[in-house]
Image (cartoon, rainbow, N blue to C red):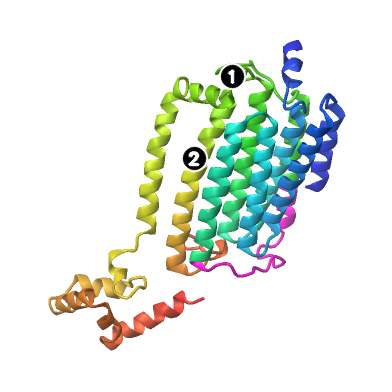
Amino acid sequence: MMAAAVHGVLLAAATATGHASAVDWGTFGVAAAIVLSGAIGVVIARNPVHGALMLVMTLFGIAVLFVLQRDDFLAAVQVIVYAGAIVVLFLFVIMFLGVDREENIAAEPLRGQRPLAVALVALGVTGLLLLGEVSKWATGAPSVAGSTDSSTSNVAQLGTSVYTTYLFPFEITSALLVIAVVGAVALARRPPMADLSRVPATDQQIAAAAGGDNGDSEGDDDRAAPDDAASGTGDTTAETEDAHQELTP
Amino acid sequence: MNSMTAATTAINGNISGQWYLALAAVLFAIGAFGLLIRRNVLVMFMCVELMLNAANLTFVTFANMLHDIGGQVLVFFVLVVAAAEVVVGLGIVVAIFRRRASATADDFHLMKG
């Protein structure tokens, strides 16, 4: 993979035009180093929390590259949404689940998976860079959706385009966000039966609660007083302890 | 041909766009590599975020190379989709963790034949 990367950089270097100032090149070089080292850190970090912090580094580097391309609004949104919201959500889930134990990276569960992954990724990125080099990197009609002129501000141009040309997709995103919120609530909600003893409901518990006349009143008692469920019949207690052991890492 | 070369040498903060595109390709490759080799579901999600960011960088670069604001609007939409994807994906991870007490992708083999 690194050979392909060096190859691509050399390809780009061979055709790059040298009109940029030293400040631009310096900024680009530092930002690119930050982005790449952060990305490699995400992949090789043993601890998921360290990986999330490396991801923050990469996202800040990308924001710097956005600013370097005169794209101020998206740089701000990148920092606020990605580094501020998404990574915090990642860290929240990592710490909520308690999976921040260190992982053995050296172990390879599937035989030959890593050489295959290296080969596939190297093939893909080499093809991508060669395709870009052959096809002059960017082809197409300039300014289909509106020009990026430097006379007006970036925010004004982006806002005009979002609320005129891309108004319908923008409205669709609101539906997407509502669906995502509803989906997250539906996924994260505990099943109603699990509220009894704070463990996943087993099939026996569900069957006991749903069927039988004499099992009905017991089910109501359990629902009213969760503490009684733990000190109830021996059957339920054993199941509860089993489930607890299953949950404990 | 002439207009094409004019488009490729357009301003990207004076740095030619090839550099940004090559960097984005390498970033995407690192993300794809991590997604293929890592086992922790949360780290795999982070690698997906790396790949999404590489795509965002290409969009912004093309927007500047072609003087087209549409690329930047697409980055805006990609951000929204990424946020929705992370919310639902992490919800699925939490739901699976509640059943299996594990965040390793190898343990999710319920549908294996």
Compare residues A150 and B28 and report the one nearer the observer. Answer: A150
Residue at (62, 17) in percent of width and height = A151
Vertical comparison of A234 with A164: above or below = below
Q: Does B56 appear in magenta? A: no
Q: Position of residue B75 (x, y in %)?
A: 56, 33
| Picture quadrant of residue B53 | top right
Which residue ends up furthest to the left in the rendered image? A213
Is label 1 in a helix, a strand or a loop?
loop
Q: Amino acid at mark 1?
A: Thr
Q: Position of residue A234 (x, y in %)?
A: 29, 88
| Res A108 label | none
Reading the image, the residue beneath label 1 is: A152
| Picture quadrant of residue B7 | top right
Closer to us: mark 1 or mark 2? 1
Left or right: A241 in relation to A84: left
Residue B28 visible: no
Q: Which part of the image, by quadrant, shows the N terminus of chain B? A: top right
Q: Are marks 1 and 2 in contact (CB under 8 Å)?
A: no
**Magenta residues: mostly which secondary structure?**
loop
Q: Amino acid at mark 2?
A: Val
Q: Does A118 appear in magenta? A: yes
Q: Chain of mark 1?
A: A
Vertical comparison of A231 with A106: above or below = below
Q: Chain of mark 2?
A: B
- The residues colored magenta run A97-120
| Picture quadrant of residue B20 | top right
Reading the image, the residue beneath label 2 is: B81
